[in-house]
Image (spheres, rainbow, N blue to C red):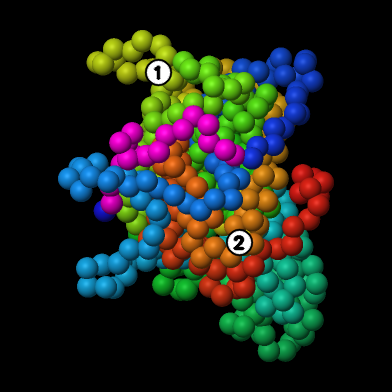
Amino acid sequence: MDVLRASSSTLVHSPYISTTTTRNKTQFPKPIFHHLKLKLIVFDSSFTLFERNGSKSRLFMTLSSSPASTTESIEPPMPELEADGREKKRFDWYSHWYPVMPICDLDKRVPHAKKVLGLDLVVWWDRNENEWKVFEDTCPHRLAPLSDGRIDQWGRLQCVYHGWCFNGNGDCKLIPQAPLDGPPVHTFKEACVTVYPSTVQHDIVWVWPNADPQYKDIIMKKKPPYIPVLDDPSFSGPMGNREFPFGYEVLLENLMDPAHLPYAHYGLIFNLTPKVKVDREGGSPLGMEVEKLDKNGFNGKQDWGCSYFIAPCIYHAFIDVDQRNGSAISETKKSNRRLCLVFMCIPVSPGKSRFIWSFPKNFGVWIDKIVPRWMFHIGQNLILDSDLYLLHVQEHKIMELEATNWQEACFVPTKSDAFVVGFRRWLNKYGGGTVDWKGKFSGALPPSPLREQLMDR
């Protein structure tokens, strides 16, 4: 178990850190922005944990020069060994539940193609068993994608290529080309579809990315990470999802970095005016530290609340709204108004990721009841658009530098990068330095399209 501490005695502080920023000039038309303004302020509090670093410098973390110092600086995310030289037990990427999609964005009438950890999946509603199923997106006949098929009149998943039909257990129930009086070839093991363990929690379909029979009932032994606030009736917040043209690592870093908000999302997110304003946007030093880091993730603390990274996919934080706004709160009385940020980041393939989010709050819940979801969709996606290109380019630049470690490419000297450094340290120390794709990819990123194509959603 590692304790990472960031203090003023061990970090280089500079109010003028040189970064390359591209400000998004996009503004809401005044009538729309007027109606969305309140929600965007809430969204600001929720999107308080992102990262964007355009520096070409190498990572530099200043360590305490005093050997007697009891305060440990944020260390570079280097792989570590046990005392006997053996690597500590690695994180098994295929022994955890992964969120696939919110059910509010799934149509029960058709199968859906999704990808997780490079695995091609088809998600479909089995009305006979009244539950969502996750199969390998491959028909055993001629390997056609089952997601291009349909749900037939008996509620079976039908392949569009030759009409083979499968039930919720992956068993083939019909091969139209097989004579009725011939051998029952549809019952052969080779005619079955690979089924992945799946479940629904927090109104999200989850998948266990290992179809080995020993994991058939894994839900009885290990459940997906539980986030109580998502089931708390006193909290309300719509859920959304989106695919991105950059990888899981960059997505998670961005969500853990609040310092970029007033810059990358300038004009779209309300930002509190700091006590000392050094520029137009209102950037300021942020007190952030990683308090505990182990194979399962880390706990973080910042000036306005607490944060948790639950490996490999979940980053969520609690914000005491009154405290962040500077309201006086006694030591014995905590803020009643709380905002929770729930970010789920799914590794899809190299250079691609999926983002599922929700911002439950226990105040202003009436907004979610009267404002249509499409209006939230407009505001949230404008914010997501405003740094999409930056993150895509950032990832490609790191790859172009052929950096063997992230710290060879980036310079992160302040406390505001504490969570980003903590995540990279977890990734190198326990996750093997990168997502385990099981040899499905070469490691190269897909070609970078024109900016207009990247922004076309």
- Residue extending furthest front? 65
Instruction: Indicate whether 1 appears above or below 169.
Output: above
Q: Main secondary structure of the magenta part?
A: loop
Queried whether the magenta region covers residue 172, the answer comes back as: no
> What is the secondary structure assignment of the residue under circle 2?
loop
Q: Residue at x 75, y 23 (%)?
A: 28
Count of marks, rendered view: 2
Q: Residue at x 40, y 11 (%)?
A: 327
- Residue extending furthest top? 328
> What is the secondary structure assignment of the residue under circle 1?
helix
In percent of width and height, residue 349 lies at 62, 62
Q: Residue at x 77, y 85 (%)?
A: 179
Is residue 318 at all visible to an observer of this figure?
no
Instruction: Indicate whether 97 appears above or below 165.
Output: above
Q: Which of the 4 quarters of the picture holds residue 395?
A: bottom right
Q: Are marks 1 and 2 in contact (CB under 8 Å)?
A: no
Classify residue 413 as left or right of residue 366: left
In percent of width and height, residue 134 lies at 59, 61
Which residues lie in the magenta part?
2-19
Q: Residues within 10 Å of mark 2 (few under 14, many from 20)?
A: few
Queried whether the magenta region covers residue 11, the answer comes back as: yes
In percent of width and height, residue 155 lies at 68, 59
Instruction: Indicate whether 329 appears above or below 241.
Output: above
Instruction: Indicate whether 241 appears above or below 325.
Output: below
Q: Residues within 10 Å of mark 1 (few under 14, many from 20)?
A: some
> What amino acid is at disc 1?
Gln
- The residue wearing badge 2 is 401
Q: Reading the chain from its start, which is encountered first: label 1 or label 2?
A: 1
Is residue 426 at all visible to an observer of this figure?
yes
- The residue wearing badge 1 is 323
Distance of mark 1 from mark 2, alpha carbons?
Answer: 42 Å
Classify residue 271 as left or right of residue 309: right
